[in-house]
Image (cartoon, rainbow, N blue to C red):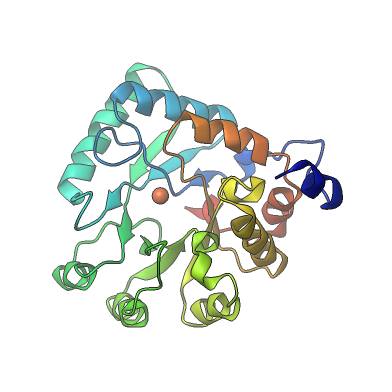
Amino acid sequence: MGFFDRFFTKSTRLDKKADLSLIGVDMHSHFIPGIDDGAQTIEDSVNLLKAMSEFGYRKVITTPHIMSDFYQNNPEIILSGLAKVKEAIQQEGIAIEVEAAAEYYLDFDLEAKIDKGGLLTFGNNYLLFEVSYMNPPDILNQVIFKLATNGYRPVLAHPERYPFWYNDFEKYEEFKDKGVLLQLNINSLTGYYGGGAKKIAEQMIEKNMVDFIGSDCHRMDHIQVMKDAQCEKYLHQLIESGMLRNAAL
Ligand SMILES: [Fe+2]
């Protein structure tokens, strides 16, 4: 944001930091080493989890990418990585519970994965999924329907990060009507992903549309941005809204 924008835009900052321990459980992050674009080494995983514990989170459900092209992960790879992470944080004496699910990318292969069954979920059969940042997927509605009819409860990751819906806010209301839950990224509130993402995130909070908040933390600089986000007025508002489902996980 340039000087004049900053000067003329109403500040969304507060002097006090939001208490992230009230969120309780983070349900979107990339902390299993070497299997996606998040933590690369077990030391990275330990440092990131230590930082999450210092924020006051009681539990982290980490969600490596599963994509047919770039990150060909599966439940076996993720769960064996999880076991190593759990062992390492126990050795380091870091007091945080760690579980794993996945962030499924909606690609040509996701329907086949649903048919096969055994997808990684968290809480009450919640399934985290993301879509392309470039263009809306044609098969979105049929995949949502298929997930629902197979007993999964789809959670759309960072809905505020898809620019093709910025001028179509009703789309988000349609998702909610179809039973899709919405997960906001904490760092969107600082403008880290751009002004568009920040604006949509704030609108969703104003309209009480947010079901989960997640760190989507990949590396230490995301932790730094989260510290900054703690002073965002809308984060306080969201935590105080009573709408978040994180704490129940
Ligand atoms: Fe993610």
The one of 108 and 54 positioned closer to us in this rendering: 108
- 210 is higher (above) or lower (below) than 247: below
Which residue is at a point 51% across and 64% down the rendered structure image? 159
Query: What residue is rendered at 31% in x and 77% in y?
Result: 143
Residue at 18% across, 51% down: 74
**Towards the viewer: 123 or 142:** 142
| Residue 155 in picture, x, y percent from top left | 43, 65
Kindly indicate the quadrant of the structure image that contains residue 48: top left
Q: Is residue 73 left or right of residue 51?
A: left
**Residue most toward the top?**
92
- Place of residue 237 in the rendered image (x, y in percent of width and height, measured from the top left): 74, 54
* Res. 12 visible in picture: no
Q: Is residue 223 above or below residue 131?
A: above
Horizontal relation, residue 225 to residue 129: left or right: right
- Quadrant of residue 146 within the rendered picture: bottom left
Q: Residue at x 67, y 62 (%)?
A: 205
